[in-house]
Amino acid sequence: MILTDKRILEEMEKGTIKVVPYNRADLGSNSYDVHLGSTMALYVDEVLDAKKHNTIEYFEIPDEGIVLEPSKFYLGVTLEYTETHAHVPFLEGKSSTGRLGIDIHATAGKGDVGFCGNWTLEISCKQPVRVYKGMPIGQLIYFPVDGEIEVKYNQKSNAKYSGQPNKPIESMMWKNKF
């Protein structure tokens, strides 16, 4: 089951779902629209290594927007800071974003109960496309969980992405043991 607009509002009143900034116009019948933040990043190295800390360089999206190129992999961030304490949040692209050939996540569309932070977006595109800070980029949908949570994500000592700031965060795969 997916939470409806009324249930999302109820959960926000209870404090189990938080979205900042919140705009009632962004609440759909069963989702909440999120927007592209002003900061993006690119990896410095052309070849990434899963066992090392790959560095990124940040850049700001100017008012006139920026053209994304299909040969590059961008990290973006949602404008919205979110908290989800009793549901599983899923981030999906909007159909309008997809129809521009923009993918907003490579594999990381599911959050965990207890995720608190801005969402890092793994952005790629099919052809050159101009994007703008503040444009609608995706939507959050919320699923109820079945059973009690033993340890929420924001309470785990090894949570690599807890408390993400309003800028993209690079892969922390290198922190895993393999």
Image (cartoon, rainbow, N blue to C red):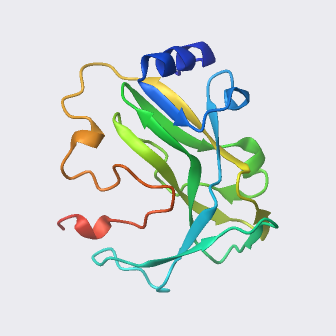
Residue 156 falls left or right of residue 13: left
Residue drawn 69% across and 65% down? 125
Q: Is residue 138 left or right of residue 145?
A: right
x, y (%) of residue 155? 23, 40
Could you say which quadrant of the image residue 7 lies in?
Answer: top right
Looking at the rendering, which quadrant does residue 75 occupy?
bottom right
Q: Residue at x 42, y 41 (%)?
A: 111
On the image, the x and y values in percent for residue 112 come to: 36, 38
Q: Is 108 drawn above or below residue 150 in the view shown?
A: below
Does the rendering let one see residue 1?
no
Query: At x 22% / y 64%, what residue is drawn?
Result: 176
Quarter the C terminus occupies: bottom left
Residue 22: x and y in percent read 61, 33
Establish if 102 lies above or below 5: below
Name which residue lies at 39% across and 42% down.
116
Q: 17 or 73, which lies in front?
A: 17
Q: Residue extending furthest right? A: 64
Asked if 12 appears above or below 78 in the picture, the reply is above
